[in-house]
Image (tube, rainbow, N blue to C red):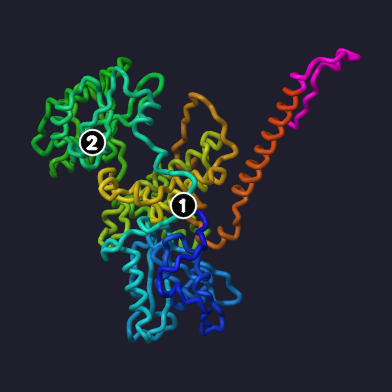
Amino acid sequence: MASASTSKYNSHSLENESIKRSSRDGVNQDLTEAVPRLPGETLITDKEVIYICPFNGPIKGRVYITNYRLYLRSLETDSALILDVPLGVISRIEKMGGATSRGENSYGLDITCKDMRNLRFALKQEGHSRRDMFEILTRYAFPLAHSLPLFAFLNEEKFNVDGWTVYNPVEEYRRQGLPNHHWRITFINKCYELCDTYPALLVVPYRASDDDLRRVATFRSRNRIPVLSWIHPENKTVIVRCSQPLVGMSGKRNKDDEKYLDVIRETNKQISKLTIYDARPSVNAVANKATGGGYESDDAYHNAELFFLDIHNIHVMRESLKKVKDIVYPNVEESHWLSSLESTHWLEHIKRIGHGDKNHTDADRSPIFLQFIDCVWQMSKQFPTAFEFNEQFLITILDHLYSCRFGTFLFNCESARERQKVTERTVSLWSLINSNKEKFKNPFYTKEINRVLYPVASMRHLELWVNYYIRWNPRIKQQQPNPVEQRYMELLALRDEYIKRLEELQLANSAKLSDPPTSPSSPSQMMPHVQTHF
């Protein structure tokens, strides 16, 4: 994650104190310098606590709470511990102990995070210390439940790149060679009236009219009709995505939907049957018929083949991730590591994020996006020269998936983001990333045209992503700075140096060739001498 700016924005009474306050430990803390802050970030409160570190035991420190983060700085001379936790990462805050608690450090707060961490703070029982911290954390970690804005709408960071211009749907479709004589762009959903969870611009078969689309929408869950996501640049094979058909227990059919899928099949004359991949296990698909859903049967869709991918539902995925968290935080028991990892089934799954709302129950959240990024990482491990970005790029995306610092991952769909004017009122994550591209580049990247990657999905070729899942363990942190990342930067610098030297040599050679000829004493003097270290 990029380091925060330390500029001061004095919009809170605590920040206006210019004097230094002496803590009870005799450690002087300047309130305006104790915690790094982003433009628009304000300090709310600070308290002395005991951080129950799962690795090193109790550590006395001072916790600072802003409208963006929880920041802990150790007050002990033999510990340089710092915790920096964006409040958007917090998923649950619970009180620990009661008024009658007598055990040491048994009274305080338990904080569960979405990034594999659990934090525990012990507080003194007198002076409503715990109540105050609990109320402030709850208020700012879950701002929507308290009629407060997410920090992304308060963030005043400025970058030299506008990340919101990175993606333009028309330009992206044009890059893919669309529209063409088989596919067209439709504006039927420009006001999100056809499907409120779909984008405004859709690519559909050229032969399907907008009236056809409306009729098909009545037979698809949430009106999510089949629309193009990707087209192969050469053979024109497409990936089309949609929701389940509304078949129900009675096995209803819809001639418009059946015809529409056949039109999609006919856009590519090289195939005789349409292949449908249903992500669910077949048992789940059958069970969904009881609630009005279902799947495309052979009887209704003669020119289609249906395959179930057996990907389990979000409840199974979430439980699997919880088991991963249990074995990697706080301790990695090396003697049982492999068997414990196997029991999580997380790597087998590799074969809704609720922002700012405490009422977003765990049952509504799914680690599907995390799984997607994990799959990308697995691919980058198997094909280290195929991806232009590095591991830090993926980790940065996941960190800001939850942080609420940027507007990129807020809300569930384009229509909601447009209603909230996200692109006008917030900063894009891509502004941060594209302002410092070198940090996220893979020096081993080799550009190859038309290369097809064939990943190996067997369990023995998959790995646990240690630098993400176990990065909070001090045994991993001791390796920082990551030697691989350090080597990345060295290689990038070396590459740039060689490119610069080559350009200088080419320029010098060009100048020599453009000079008027002189009478050489020997033929060899007419040959330019260019040397490089390659």
Magenta stretch prevailing secondary structure: loop
Say which of marks 1 and 2 sits in front. 1
The amino acid type of the residue labelled 1 equals Lys
Residue at the (50%, 60%) spot, across then down = 472
Camera-side residue: 54 or 385? 385
Identify the residue position indicated by label 2 in the image: 190
Q: Which mark is residue 425?
A: none
Say whether residue 301 is left or right of residue 110: left
Residue 492 image position (x, y, % from top left): 63, 41
| Relative side of 444 to 51, left or right | right
Total number of numbered discs in the rendering: 2
Q: Nearer the viewer, residue 18 or 459?
A: 18
Residue 426 coordinates in the image, percent (x, y): 37, 51
In depth, the one of 15 and 272 nearer the eye is: 15
- Mark 1 — residue? 158
- View extreme (right): residue: 521
Above or below — where is 390 with respect to 66? above
Secondary structure category for the residue under label 1: loop
Circle 1 packing at 10 Å, graded few (<14), some (14-19), many (20+), is: few
Residue occupying the point 18% across, 24% down: 209
Quarter assignment of residue 46? bottom left
Q: Residue at x 45, y 65 (%)?
A: 9
The answer for how far apart the CA atoms under marks 1 and 2 are is: 31 Å
Whole-percent x and y of residue 25? 54, 83
Residue 532 belongs to magenta span: yes
Q: Which residues are magenta?
A: 512-534
Above or below: residue 519 compared with residue 165: above
